[in-house]
Image (tube, rainbow, N blue to C red):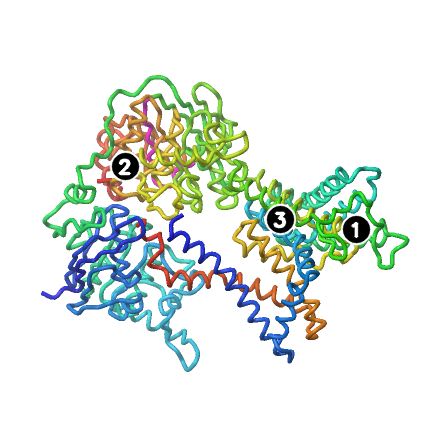
Amino acid sequence: MNLNSFKLRLKDALVPLILIFIAFLFSAVWISFMGKSPLEAYSALFAGAFGSTSGIVNTIKKSVPIAFASFAVIVSTKANVFNIGAEGQLAMGAFGATMAGIFLKGLPAAIHIPAAILAAALGGMAFALIPALLRVKRGINLLVVLLLMNNIARFLLQFFVLDAFASDNALVPSTDRIMESARLPYLIGPPYRLTIAILIVLAVAIILELFFRRSTAGYEMRAVGLSPEAARYAGIDINRYMLLGLLLSGALAGVGGGLEILGNHHRLYIDFSPGYGYDGIPIALLSGGSPLISILGSLLFGALRTGSLTMQAKVGISDEIISVIQGSLILCIAANYFVKYLLNRRRADKKGKEAAK
Amino acid sequence: MVYAVEMRGITKRFPAVLANDHIDIAIKAGTVHAIIGENGAGKSTLMNILYGLHKPDQGEILINGQKQVFGSATDAIACGIGMVHQHFMLVPRLTVADNVVLGKEPRKGLLYDRKGAIAKVAEVCSRHNIQVDPGKKVADISLGMQQRVEIVKTLYRGAEIIILDEPTAVLTPQEIDDLGEILRQLKEGGKTIIIITHKLEEVMDFSDDISVLRGGKHIATLRKEATDIPELTRLMVGRDVQLGGRKESAPGKEEALRLTDIGYVAEGRKVLKGISLVLHKGEVLGLAGIDGSGQSQLAEIVAGVLTPSAGSIKFQDRDITGKTVAQRKKGGIGFIAQDRQKHGLVMDFSIAENLVLGFQRRPEYCQYKIGVNSKAVISGAQKRIKEYDIRTPGESVRVSMLSGGNQQKVVVAREMGSRPQLIVADQPTRGVDVGAIEAIHNILIDHRNKGGSVLLVSLELDELMMLSDRIAVFFDGRLMGILDSASATREQIGMMMVGSSLPKQGEAAKGGKQAESRKEEPVS
């Protein structure tokens, strides 16, 4: 890589950072409207997320399902579909893992855990199958379908947790606990309880990067995502890749939900996900389609979710401010083109396009 | 004498390319000055410098004898320079008037004065005798009209010097004539016009003076009366150009492709009606017709991207009617699609990635069954770039960064590289410069000479007559007849293109007029 393309890369990396900065700035305005000091709020946020070992561990823990949700969105986008149904698929994955965790009995952990993760993947995939078929067979726009599927998932979850698989001996409504053999082993034991889930995140990100960069199927999927018409003219079956992309996306979201149960809760609650599936969307957009980079974004969102509790306790700002930050981030991404334009204009001279002319 | 524009010693270097190399150019006030050159000759860069979009590394610019330094396009506009880009920069949802005044809107207090805008735009139009409806939405008007809006935009900002970048690329023949008229009017009104182009017929039609660039250098500036198309071509390319290739043998007799009773229906309209024809080995079969007569659809049916509603296709004695695109590629059919940017290339892929598109499953590009063999892809790309003279700093450059001619070379290199028996070429030279046209012609004819077959769709009658052994003429989805190109005349073909069956000798002259009135563009 020569110096010039390195500079270009640097610029690409700069844009997401600027967007995040603007989002924080914007939210600071609201915080001051509430009569609080943004500086105090943010330092509490930071302290909560990174100021202690348990804070850091919690940040990492929360980043796991978020990272899987962002993988899900990235994979679907590469296949020219926009999966905003990750939240529902995540819930169904959690359900699949819980079922495998409760009802598969007498298995050693080395088999039980992979089986439960597989069940999570199948749960998420099954829930993505209906929209995928609607898209491929009927050409229906998925945005609305996927969004509504999230609601269906929520109600299904309520049915499972409050009725069909409700535990008789739990203080809050939930299912029974999963078997010991299905629980993820700890990297750092109690009181921190950091499980191997973070290693699974890393492994999956690397596999996905290799898939897109090095495999023939990944190449074909990228072609479909970037230019479906050119892909069709090249003889690539674009429907197959849309189907494959959405199913793989659903499976990834499902695994994210499954790991949350297998690693942290060990039983299924109605509200086990505060919206991890939605967190994946801005991260996927910010990371420029790279699973490895999206892990960084997931850590940021994990930190927001962790630190907001401290912020609430110390400064007295509702943790809903996290939604405001996320909302402004999405707005900023929409305005991303504008920021890119400003940066490009300053370096218009150096653009290679004219060089080729 | 004071020139409207003088550029002295302009030098501009981009990473890996010296785009402008000490260019001296002087443009007389009140003339139409053409700047010509192949893609990549540095025309656009030079004009972007004049318009303040680029800063030159060296050299100076004089406008009406005054030295000027442009930091941005705003400075250039203030100096009376306007530019109409090849891709129009209009907001489709706004009206013509809104678009013209955008950025310099008339105001009533704090508010935008819409009526004032319409009145002002109408006034500019009538002063220069340009017909545009200021109240229409840009989305609803033709490309030719949009171009006029762009011209009006520059006039509204007080431009005295107007640069047009490839102004005819998107226009129909009629619109090109209209543009010529507008340019004449502007010139008479005292404006100085600079057009960038590589289409020489228009240069001869429109301009007073012609400057030729090649490889970033200024080669010559000539008066139109003192030159002709062959000389300009030679100056542009740097050598004599031989279009049409050289056929070395008679076409073969062995059948390569047989279409039987092909029909195609789209949106309830019969696009193709009962087409039957045969293409032999070692033969170029040209498909002629007015744009939209069904010839492109026929090409796409043979390539497999369209499914015929009736009929059968036989290739090398096997029925391939139901085969997929991938199977046909594997079986030896290459396809140069008409729209290279939409169908031929993934614009965000690199050159190397595009060179394997559609062939990514061939064993030589694969590794361990499922992986891409990057080394083979890259070395293959480097070989093709050399072999097909694709002008690029390297194989990892995104294909969207290349000029049209080089993009097309990527498509041709890919489709020919798999050594197909049949090549289906749908307007393979559309919008590329004369050097690339020559290269593509040679490649197609070379393929034919080696015993391959070519199914060629072109709207350029001259190109068809030069390259084809036989020409099949289409009208309204029907095959009007197949002519031997050695004995066929432009008049005969032109007549059949507008719906007459094979004309008798006496009618040929009348047909000639019709063909001419359609303004077939010669390839030069």
Left or right of A112: which side holds B69?
A: left
Q: Secondary structure at mark 2?
A: helix
Question: Residue A241 is drawn in which quadrant?
Answer: top right
Q: Position of residue B273 (x, y in %)?
A: 44, 32
Q: Foreground residue, A182 or A53? A: A53
- From which residue to which does the magenta span run? B282-297
Q: Kindly report which numbered mark, 2 or 1, lies closer to the viewer in this rendering.
A: 1
Task: Determine whether label 2 and label 1 are within 8 Å by CB.
Answer: no
Distance in Å between CA atoms under marks 1 and 3:
23 Å
Task: Determine whether label 1 and label 3 are within 8 Å by CB.
Answer: no
Distance in Å between CA atoms under marks 2 and 1:
75 Å
Q: Position of residue A316 (x, y in %)?
A: 70, 75
Left or right of A137: which side holds B378?
A: left
Q: Same chain for marks 2 and 3?
A: no
Residue visible at 48% across and 45% down? A227
Q: Kindly report which numbered mark, 1 or 3, lies closer to the viewer in this rendering.
A: 1
Q: Position of residue A268 (x, y in %)?
A: 79, 52
Q: What subunit carries mark 1?
A: A
| In magenta stretch: residue B285 | yes
Q: What subunit carries mark 3?
A: A
* Mark 3 neighbour class, 10 Å CA radius: few under 14, some 14 to 19, many 20 or more: many
Q: Foreground residue, B384 or B306? A: B384
Residue visible at 56% across and 71% down? A26
* Mark 1 neighbour class, 10 Å CA radius: few under 14, some 14 to 19, many 20 or more: many
The residue identified by callout 1 is A266
Q: What subunit carries mark 2?
A: B
Q: Say which quadrant the N terminus of chain B sits in.
A: bottom left
The residue identified by callout 2 is B461
Q: Amino acid at mark 2?
A: Leu
Question: Residue A285 is drawn in which quadrant?
Answer: bottom right
The residue identified by callout 3 is A72
Q: Secondary structure at mark 3?
A: helix
